[in-house]
Amino acid sequence: MTAGGTLRVVLGDQLSETIASLDGLAPATDTVLLMEVMGECSYVRHHPQKIALVLSAMRHFSAALRARGVRVRHVRLEDAGNTGTLSGEVLRAVRELRPERVVATEPGEWRVAQDMAGWEAATGVPVEIRADGRFLCPLPWFRQWAGARRQLRMEFFYRDMRRNSGLLMDGAEPAGGQWNFDAENRQRLPRGMIPPMLERFAPDAVTAEVLEMVGRLFAGNFGLLEGFAWPVTAAQAEAALADFISHRLPFFGDYQDAMAEGEATLFHALLSTSLNLGLLLPRAVCEAAEAAWRQGRAPLNAVEGFVRQILGWREYVRGLYWLKMPGYAELNALEARCPLPAVYWGAPTSMACMRAAIGQTERMAYAHHIQRLMVTGNFALLTGVAPAEINAWYLAVYADAFEWVELPNTHGMAIWADGGIMASKPYAASGAYINRMSDHCRGCQHDVKAAVGPKACPFNFLYWDFVARHAEKFAANPRMAMPLNNLRKMDPARLAAIRAEAARFLADLTRRADAGDAIT
Ligand code: FAD
Ligand code: SF4
């Protein structure tokens, strides 16, 4: 290998042909570096499907580059000499290839950015770190936007993003005359309605080889490998997008918040893995949805609701993550300290809603937003699970989990550990919410109408205990006025009984967590 040229680093979630580090690629002299390293596969105990997805997508990406005549150094996880870390592999590549410089794209996680900042000193060659241009909101723009505001709220960010991007706009006005069609959305799934089957992608030889390796090396991790069917190439991701637009997008808004026994995916897109790895670009996904509306193939309430998730929430949480890290992860506004209950790792539970959400997480490395927020997230919020423990769980078990998107959603939205930076009030709810949006309660051992007694729904007594426990903290929050009012009106004897029920449950939870046992 001759010295010179540029070493171009592509991380496992940067698998886009347009990634900044490949800008200006000179195939005759440059080498593209992809690194499968144990450090990245094990900094949390990732679901085996997540590890397999990233490694298989990386191998397919390398193959596609090589087919275009690009020189690729792809370090495999089990290669002899693999140092196990990104920094170690960059250093090894620089020593062996002797490039003039290294070019990388800014990573999605704070800890990798810290690592990357040391590459120049470690390798002794210039390291250029480029902005990640795949997102619709450049980070400097977000910083400026946030700097001009006393309070950050997604809805206003989203409107500005609509204006900036031109998505779903008719001139200066929002398409259809409204920014938000949520009032028409969020219905319960009608009885007998069967959501369409998903297009799934059977493993090819490359994926099969990865699955064998991951099954061997990560056998102890929570989650099943069987049934792996994630898109691992840009072409498969395009097919998944087309399938969503044709078959599920028209109902996306209506049933966005619905949950149903035995229905893991409903009308959701299942595109977050492809977006987060870079197999799909957010603008193209939003444009495809907008085109479906303009061609009369999907209603505006569905398309606007979908675009808001990507152009709004996805960009917003990324901006927030980079604005607030590293201190953000340390916040613990509600002083939550409980260990993660064993049910999160699949221990048997009598709670049908938790069983459904965690069971499908184990099978598929997937749960949709409302399951993450209002079932497993709500339970962690109400029981006071320590932020570090629940954050690590979400980061581990979902195939789409990368810290820039996982942390604000968990830490900020689900468990309100940031004290309201992300959400104006905690997403705390009793069993009534789950009963309204799902059919889980029908087949549950607990009685969703009961807050005390042997069959009481844990979400009920935990909810009132949570509101009472934090009443002082929430007193100045106008969005918590209603639950606090209801709490004040509650018969003191009933409240005492509810809180005693909650205390018993929480004590049992801690005891069982210590013993690694089931929760109820
Ligand atoms: P759909 O419901 O079909 O939504 C379409 C797309 O919008 C998604 O693919 C995703 O890219 C985007 N999106 C929707 N909601 C959000 C959101 N709140 N934040 C960012 N993007 C959003 N999403 C991740 O990509 N990675 C995570 O690690 C992650 N962790 C989460 C943890 C918690 C506690 C919660 C409440 C949410 C989390 N989310 C995460 C957001 C959301 O739940 C997932 O993006 C979504 O469930 C992915 O499935 P889907 O592709 O079928 O999404
Ligand atoms: Fe969940 Fe309570 Fe309904 Fe059971 S009764 S499914 S625990 S909300």
Image (cartoon, grey):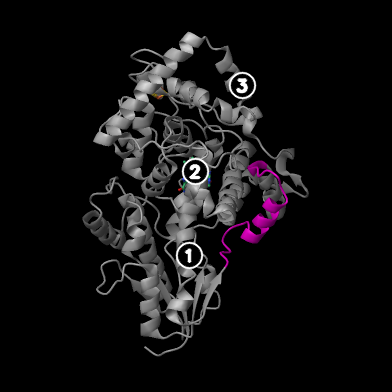
User: Residue 42, how many percent across, how many down?
Assistant: 32, 57
Label 2 sits on a secondary structure element that is helix
Q: How many residues crowd mark 3 within 10 Å: few (<14), some (14–19), many (20+)?
A: few
- Which residue is painted at 40% across and 90% down in the image? 2
Magenta highlight range:
131-155
Left or right for 138, reference 189: right
Label 3 to label 1: alpha-carbon separation? 44 Å
The type of residue carrying mark 2 is His
Residue 324 drawn in magenta: no
The residues bearing labels 3 and 2 have C-alpha atoms spaced at a distance of: 24 Å
Where does label 2 land, which residue? 411
Ligand 1 within 8 Å of disc 1? The answer is no
Residue at 31 percent across and 67 percent down: it is 84
Residue 154 is inside the magenta segment: yes
Q: Which mark is residue 71?
A: none
Q: Is residue 370 visible?
A: yes
Residue at image position (33%, 49%) is 47
Rounded to the nearest angstrom, the CA distance separating label 2 from label 1 is 21 Å
Q: Residues within 10 Å of mark 2 (few under 14, many from 20)?
A: many
Please tell me how many numbered marks the rendered image carries: 3
Q: Secondary structure at mark 1?
A: helix
Residue 8, image x and y in percent? 47, 75
Q: Is mark 2 within 8 Å of ligand 1?
A: no
Tag 3 residue: 482
* Residue 114: mark: 1
Please report whichever mark, 3 or 1, sits nearer to the chain's N-terminal start: 1
Residue 37 vs 329, above or below: the answer is: below
| Circles 3 and 2: CB atoms closer than 8 Å | no
Residue type at mark 3: give it.
Answer: Met
